Image: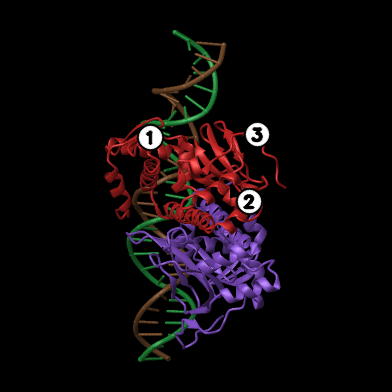
Chain colours: A red, B purple, C green, D brown
Amino acid sequence: MPNKSAVPISLVGIKAACSQCSLHELCLSEGLSKEELARLDSLVGARRKLKRQQSLYRAGDAFEALYAVRTGFFKTDVLLEDGREQVTGFQMAGEILGMDGIGTEVHTCNAVALEDSEVCVIPFALLEQLSREIQALQHNFHKVMSRELVRDQGLMMLLGTMRAEERLAAFLLNMSQRFTSRGYSAAEFHLRMTREEIGSYLGLKLETVSRVFSRFQEEGFIAVQQKHIRILDGDGLRRLLNQRSR
Amino acid sequence: MPNKSAVPISLVGIKAACSQCSLHELCLSEGLSKEELARLDSLVGARRKLKRQQSLYRAGDAFEALYAVRTGFFKTDVLLEDGREQVTGFQMAGEILGMDGIGTEVHTCNAVALEDSEVCVIPFALLEQLSREIQALQHNFHKVMSRELVRDQGLMMLLGTMRAEERLAAFLLNMSQRFTSRGYSAAEFHLRMTREEIGSYLGLKLETVSRVFSRFQEEGFIAVQQKHIRILDGDGLRRLLNQRSR
DNA sequence: TTATCGTATTGACATGGATCAAAGCGACAG
DNA sequence: CTGTCGCTTTGATCCATGTCAATACGATAA
């Protein structure tokens, strides 16, 4: 039974406008004509603002829409009955949330804002309708889902075969790369999540995350200060990843 | 058990026919009208037969089509440069392979037949075209992709938080459930994969898989004899899964 | 300023699963 | 039938990471 989102939804009246949005190439609007973009604009109903720690949706909620992150930072996680948590992803501007709900009409994970954030609400029925009419939109959407599957493959590889140091190196390089492709510094960034959340994502305990960060610092790969990370030797991290581990 | 034919054909001239296929509810054709089914039939170009150990596609291959498993059994895996392998899934009749390639036009994993198998070839450009015209087909396809994302979530949870016994219990129950929904016995089945492949899928070494199977047998949960598995106490396995581990 | 609370770091120790090694088993070719 | 080969089982040992515990840090509120 889908339960109601516990937090009052804050819908802001501002119309989203994919045509104005700086996240083209990451989102669904790439390669659309002016006229098609306008139609996509009219589909994307509204934006929704979330404060830090607010849920965008929870496991069990009825599925109605996808969400495109406009600003901010999210995590998605799954909970086991006994309380164990697995963080399944961290999402930043331009990334799409909610696709887990399509198959069953019900969300299967929780999506939580890790900082004050804003998303575009994309009613799914309308997206399907419009993507029957706009081939490029249809294809973009399929690509987004497929890339998510490929991302998952990478994470399985990480969880299934990598040692702690490799996991953290992969994590840092991935964050760096994603910040870069959004125009931020590749070398210096703020982690929005706790050590525990990183650990959960990587299949490690928070103490291990902390220890490996310290070791990386001793070895000159990075400078850590709480959530602030500076990458001093990206190639060093990359070497760590590619070398035969055992 | 399917036996090996001496003929190494890969493409058979027989037209597939979704309308005749017994895998409706698992595949893409659920809820389609007679007329729509006929159109789907004409889309599904041909079947392709694979012998045990043959690749359906490999990482790096150009992406052109999806494949629906008609008979047989597959694994998908990803390889790291240093030779480490992560099995990302096992696929049986009615399941769709190849969606990893949509995002980049290139396959990102290998798909290998674990026994002599047959697939329906679904040229992807045609599938997109037809699903612009048939709403139910479009929606079915989206559901299939979404369910794959949810499956991945479950696997991440397994790889990130579960102990060896829980992983094996989850694996056995999952296999049992999938055999059941295809009309086979829930309690007795043949594993088509080696201990090493199971281990790779579950993030364990083959020795650990073997040991846990032996332990399960000692405790009366299952009877193992090589690849033949009999589940004697499914509830016992389920209890193992649900109990707080530590 | 000081108290508090969530988060992070670090140390000491425990352990589950990996590693290494040796048989055992079954299918198949000759 | 016999030998070979791939796969599986089992034992002994090791080690990476988990667990438990103490302390430190930084933001915020009083």
**Residue B231 shows in this picture:** no
- For the residues labelled 2 and 3, say whether their Cβ atoms are less than 8 Å apart: no
The chain to which mark 2 is attached is: A
Q: Residue at x 27, y 45 (%)?
A: A235
- The residue identified by callout 3 is A7
Q: Residue at x 68, y 47 (%)?
A: A62
Vertical arrangement, residue A19 with respect to residue B156, above or below: above
What residue did someone put label 2 on?
A: A126
Task: Identify the residue at horizontal 66%, vertical 50% (top origin).
Answer: A106
Looking at the rendered structure, the secondary structure element under dot 2 is: helix
* Percent of width and height locating residue A220: 27, 37
Q: Position of residue B120 (x, y in %)?
A: 54, 75
Kindly identify which residue carries mark 1. Answer: A189
Q: 10 Å neighbourhood of mark 1: few (<14), some, or many (≥20)?
A: some
Q: Earlier in the sequence, mark 1 or mark 2?
A: 2
Q: CA distance from mark 1 to mark 2?
A: 37 Å
Residues at discs 3 and 1 in contact (Cβ within 8 Å): no
For marks 3 and 1, give the CA distance.
30 Å
